[in-house]
């Protein structure tokens, strides 16, 4: 593909979608994570943030755009507006509203805690979502299911565990023991299908004029604890964030154990994406969870 052809097609789609002519006069490469390339396109005062990948990944961009719209409908947390998406000259593209983002300070993280609780109050009658999407570049299966334990066992933990075993992680036996005992973590707790960001780590949070913004979602409806757990996996969220969330919607006491269960999904996914020490980290997490069951 040639970027000139891609940008010309993208400009046409922006013009058609916004009903205002757009022509690319400036372009600036920016960080797009380890999965996509990203560019800011500008025509005078108008700017757009554009992600590019191979044309075969267009469904990934479709799901991301629909996920952003799902969060917008919850009237909770600001997200970039998806403008248009599709394919051009062998590339898949996603055009997003351009936002001047900085790091989230303590005040905006406190606001995020309140707004995240509000987003989690957007619920459905089943776990999952109407579209499959990705977590990183790994497929994330969202087949709607009425039983949370079944959903987590089959479409989250089991999926990543099977993939990790194929990728050389020797944890099948104890992983299967854990999956057989999942119901023990939910004996006195019944989660509701809450709208989740799905990939809520510090790198997917920013702020504009001290108001929080979240982006790069892996949306589905699931246990709200799964979003909170991931905020603890890599750090970066202030005490005021957690205090604000707890003030708006207190967590069940069993969260302190279940957060390891939920973060195991992401650690296994990191092994499947990057290899290295994530496999042994996953093994230690499984050992801890099995120990909690015995204890």
Image (cartoon, rainbow, N blue to C red):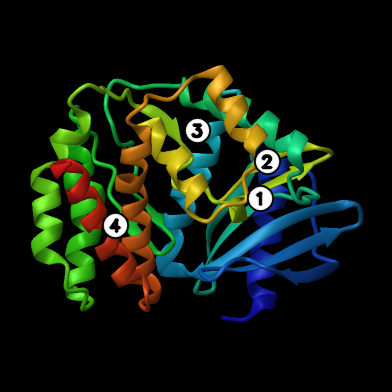
**Labelled pair 2, 4 in contact (Cβ < 8 Å):** no
Q: In the image shown, does 46 or 75 lie closer to the viewer?
A: 75
Q: Earlier in the sequence, mark 1 or mark 4?
A: 1
In which image quadrant can residue 27 be found?
A: bottom right
Q: Quadrant of the N terminus?
A: bottom right
User: In this view, which residue lies farthest toward the front?
Assistant: 295
Nearest to the eye among marks 4 and 3: give it: 4
Disc 4 target residue: 285
**Whether residue 221 is visible:** no
**Labelled pair 2, 3 in contact (Cβ < 8 Å):** no
As displayed, is residue 292 above or below residue 77?
Answer: below
Mark number displayed over residue 96: 1
Residue 287 location (% of width, % of height): 21, 57
> Is disc 1 surrounded by few (<14), some (14 to 19) or many (20+) residues within 10 Å?
many
Residue at 15% of width from left, 34% of height from top? Answer: 184
From mark 2 to mark 1, how far is it between C-alphas? 13 Å
Q: In the image shown, does 223 or 264 lie closer to the viewer?
A: 264
> Is disc 2 surrounded by few (<14), some (14 to 19) or many (20+) residues within 10 Å?
many
> Is disc 3 surrounded by few (<14), some (14 to 19) or many (20+) residues within 10 Å?
some
> Is disc 4 surrounded by few (<14), some (14 to 19) or many (20+) residues within 10 Å?
some
Disc 3 target residue: 70
Q: In the image shown, does 259 or 40 lie closer to the viewer?
A: 259
**Labelled pair 1, 3 in contact (Cβ < 8 Å):** no
Nearest to the eye among marks 2 and 1: give it: 2
Q: In the image shown, does 198 or 285 lie closer to the viewer?
A: 285
Q: Secondary structure at mark 2?
A: strand
Mark number displayed over residue 213: 2
**Labelled pair 4, 3 in contact (Cβ < 8 Å):** no
């Amino acid at each position: 593909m040639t970027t000139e052809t891609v940008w010309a097609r993208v400009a046409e789609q922006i013009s058609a979608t916004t009903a205002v002519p757009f022509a690319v006069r400036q372009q600036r490469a920016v960080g797009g994570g380890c999965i996509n390339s990203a560019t800011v396109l500008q025509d005078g005062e108008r700017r757009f943030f554009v992600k590019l990948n191979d044309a075969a990944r267009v469904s990934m961009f479709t799901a991301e755009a629909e996920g952003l719209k799902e969060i917008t409908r919850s009237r909770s947390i600001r997200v970039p507006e998806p403008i248009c998406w599709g394919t051009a000259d062998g590339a898949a593209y996603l055009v997003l509203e351009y936002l001047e983002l900085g790091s989230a300070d303590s005040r905006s993280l406190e606001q995020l805690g309140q707004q995240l609780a509000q987003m989690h109050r957007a619920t459905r009658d089943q776990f999952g979502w109407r579209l499959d999407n990705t977590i990183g570049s790994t497929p994330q299966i969202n087949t709607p299911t009425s039983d949370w334990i079944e959903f987590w066992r089959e479409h989250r933990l089991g999926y990543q565990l099977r993939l990790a075993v194929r990728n050389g992680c020797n944890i099948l036996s104890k992983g299967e023991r854990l999956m057989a005992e999942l119901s023990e973590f939910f004996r006195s707790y019944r989660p509701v299908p809450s709208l989740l960001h799905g990939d809520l780590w510090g790198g997917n949070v920013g702020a504009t004029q001290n108001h929080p913004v979240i982006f790069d979602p892996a949306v589905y409806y699931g246990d709200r604890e799964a979003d909170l757990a991931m905020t603890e996996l890599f750090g970066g969220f202030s005490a005021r964030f957690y205090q604000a969330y707890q003030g708006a919607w207190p967590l069940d006491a069993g969260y302190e154990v279940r957060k390891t269960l939920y973060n195991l999904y992401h650690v296994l996914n990191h092994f499947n994406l990057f290899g290295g020490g994530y496999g042994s980290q996953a093994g230690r997490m499984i050992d801890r969870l099995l120990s909690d069951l015995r204890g």
